[in-house]
Image: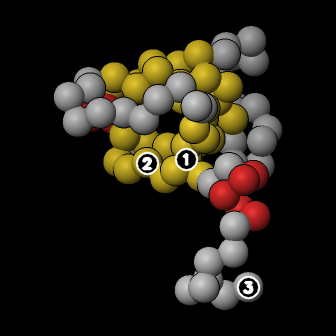
Amino acid sequence: MAYTLLLHLANEDPMVVDVEEMPKAVDNLLICHHPRRKDNKDLRNIEPNVNTLIFPLQRINFIEVLPTGEEEEILLPYRNS
């Protein structure tokens, strides 16, 4: 299952990436695919034809897991709808 993440890197704007699996506590690197800005435009500091990035986890401040289309359709009682 692929996950879409919002990476917050040290001294950089956040970026949206896709990963095949969530990083584990013992991982040192995060392999990301399809890097893009939050508005789905190309990143300005990465070549346009680059499709995969490898980041050391020490460079990442925190990671947000973005919901999939299926998860957005589920209405939970504690959400404001």
- Residue designated by label 3: 81
The colour style of the image is: secondary structure
At label 1, the amino acid type is Leu
Q: How many neighbours does mark 3 have within 10 angstroms: few (below 14), some (14-19), or many (20 or more)?
A: few
Q: Is residue 55 left or right of residue 50?
A: left
Q: How far apart are marks 3 and 1 (CA)?
A: 23 Å
Asked if disc 3 and disc 1 are in contact, CB closer than 8 Å, the reply is no
Q: Is residue 69 left or right of residue 4?
A: right
Whichever of labels 3 and 1 marks the residue nearer the N terminus, that label is 1
Q: Distance between the residues labelled 2 and 1?
A: 6 Å
Looking at the image, is mark 3 or mark 1 nearer the viewer?
3
Query: At which x and y percent is residue 48?
Result: 75, 18
At label 2, the amino acid type is Ile
Q: In which quarter of the image is residue 36?
A: top right
At label 3, the amino acid type is Ser
Q: Is residue 6 left or right of residue 44?
A: left
Looking at the picture, does residue 7 appear above or below residue 48?
A: below
Q: How many neighbours does mark 1 have within 10 angstroms: few (below 14), some (14-19), or many (20 or more)?
A: some
Q: Nearer the viewer, residue 13 or 69?
A: 69
Asked if disc 2 and disc 1 are in contact, CB closer than 8 Å, the reply is yes
Q: Quadrant of the C terminus?
A: bottom right
Q: Quadrant of residue 9?
A: top left
Q: What element carries label 1?
A: strand
Looking at the image, is mark 2 or mark 3 nearer the viewer?
3
Q: Which of 16 and 45 is in front in this view?
A: 16
The reply to whether residue 11 is visible in this rendering is: no
Q: Nearer the viewer, residue 73 or 25?
A: 73
Looking at the picture, does residue 51 appear above or below residue 68?
A: above
Q: Is mark 2 on a helix, strand or loop?
A: strand
- Residue designated by label 1: 6
Q: In which quarter of the image is the N terminus?
A: top right
- Residue designated by label 2: 63
